[in-house]
Amino acid sequence: MRLLESVFQKHNFIPLTALIFLQALLSQSAYSHGISEADKLAIIEGGNLAYMELGATHMLTGYDHLLFVFGIIFFLRTFRDIVKYVTAFTLGHSVTLIYATFKAIQLNYFIIDAIIGLSVCYIAFANIDGFRKYLNINPPNMLAMIFCLGLIHGMGLSTRLQALPLSEDSLLLNIISFNVGIELGQIFALLLMILVMDVWRKTHSFKNLSVISNYFLIIAGALLFLMQMHGYSHASNPDEFAIAINQSQVNVNELTTSVTETRPTQEPTLWKDTIDVTIPARSGKEYKFYLEETASFDYAWQSNGVALYYDFHGEPEGDNTGYFKSYEESTSNQGNGSLIAPFSGIHGWYWQNDSSSPVIVTLKSKGNYRRLDNEETYSKEVSIPATHDSLDSL
């Protein structure tokens, strides 16, 4: 305790919010707190305990949620008040987390996270009594507003949870396990915040910097809002916003100039094959063709009305590094175009269905290729779009 107090006295020019937000900006997830492919694989292998662990980790690294909780407790001194307001937030985000996930309700990641950034601005604005000072009105009931804003935070948590390979048979238990992990992570973070705030309040810097810290909290929330809106305007699919490309991929891309071109399908088209692919509920499936290098390929696919996340990609024959070249990645209920294969290997789609019902994709194709679905080597129904190394055996 004395060590913490001496740190605040020595560095009283650094608001606590600055330290929290700086950590967020330096983290790899500063634009998005998504679910990594490693986490998806761990979920499949670990079951409900893995959901709980991931929920706790997600809350502890969710800088926007942490900033909001920090704003809630900033001027709360009694244990009763802290429990009352944090409980309102917990109830709010638990309701939408459970309901939206169970009903497969999804909203755009960026839009939800942008609103969550504004919620951070709101709580800080209320802390400095901004409604009376700047708007000359009485502030809304804080307890009710925290509950309502918690509903929005829960929607953000739900969209992330639905990126996981949820089991239809134990869906509710998966959701509850994740939510329990969220609450455990929140309790741990809250205890640390209370400890730090208790020490900070005893220093001379608190009185001078408390208002400044909340202004910084407003700035932090505004920056989060702008970052998410920037992502929304530059990506049609949230998961493609910050993709790290390793050097081997860059080198291969420099050597290959053939890329897919999306163009309207001209009618009449004499398709070579028409294939129906069923994508299971809350799961994913791949469909691939084998193409020789420079082989031409035309395609058009359409789902039965449901928008699917998809990745159109190719994997070089004989490659053991896990490398794959992504030609097109987005979310839609249809796609069409052409490809000249940059290398010999398998080329095709991964489709992810996050809805609660199976989806049928009708794929039409023509060109110089070999179908793999009639061969014993092609029986790959997968749950996650990793680096597609699950298909290395093809």
Image: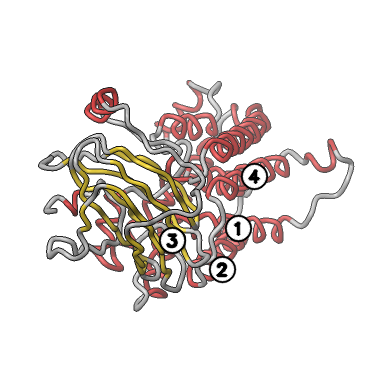
Residues under numbered marks 1 and 4 in contact, where contact means CB atoms less than 8 Å apart: no
The answer to whether mark 1 and mark 2 are in CB contact below 8 A is yes
Quarter of image, res 276: bottom left
Q: Place residue 155 in its image quadrant.
A: bottom right
Which tag is nearer the camera, tag 4 or tag 2? 2
The answer to whether 62 appears left or right of 391 in the picture is right
Tags 3 and 2 in contact by the CB under 8 Å rule? no
Please tell me whether mark 2 sits on a helix, a strand or a loop. helix
Regarding mark 4 in the picture, which secondary structure is present there? Answer: loop
Q: Is residue 202 above or below residue 40?
A: above
Query: Disc 1 residue type?
Result: Gly
Residue type beneath disc 3: Gln
- Say which residue label 3 marks: 162
> Which comes sooner in the sequence, label 1 or label 4?
4
Q: Which mark is residue 293?
A: none
- Which numbered circle lies on residue 75? 4
How far is the residue under mark 3 from the one under mark 2?
15 Å
Q: Which mark is residue 150?
A: 1
Sequence-first tag of 4 and 2: 4
Residue 353: horizontal and vertical position, in percent? 41, 63
Alpha-carbon distance for marks 3 and 1?
A: 18 Å
Q: Earlier in the sequence, mark 1 or mark 2?
A: 2
Q: Position of residue 379 (x, y in %)?
A: 19, 65
Disc 4/disc 3 C-alpha distance (Å): 35 Å
Q: Which residue matches tag 2?
A: 95
Depth-wise, is mark 1 or mark 4 nearer the camera?
1
Q: Nearer the viewer, mark 3 or mark 1?
A: 3
Crowd around label 1: few <14 · some 14–19 · many ≥20 (10 Å): many
For the residues bearing labels 4 and 2, Cβ distance under 8 angstroms: no
Dot 3 or dot 2, earlier in sequence: 2
Q: Is residue 40 left or right of residue 84?
A: left
Nearest the eye: 100 or 129: 100
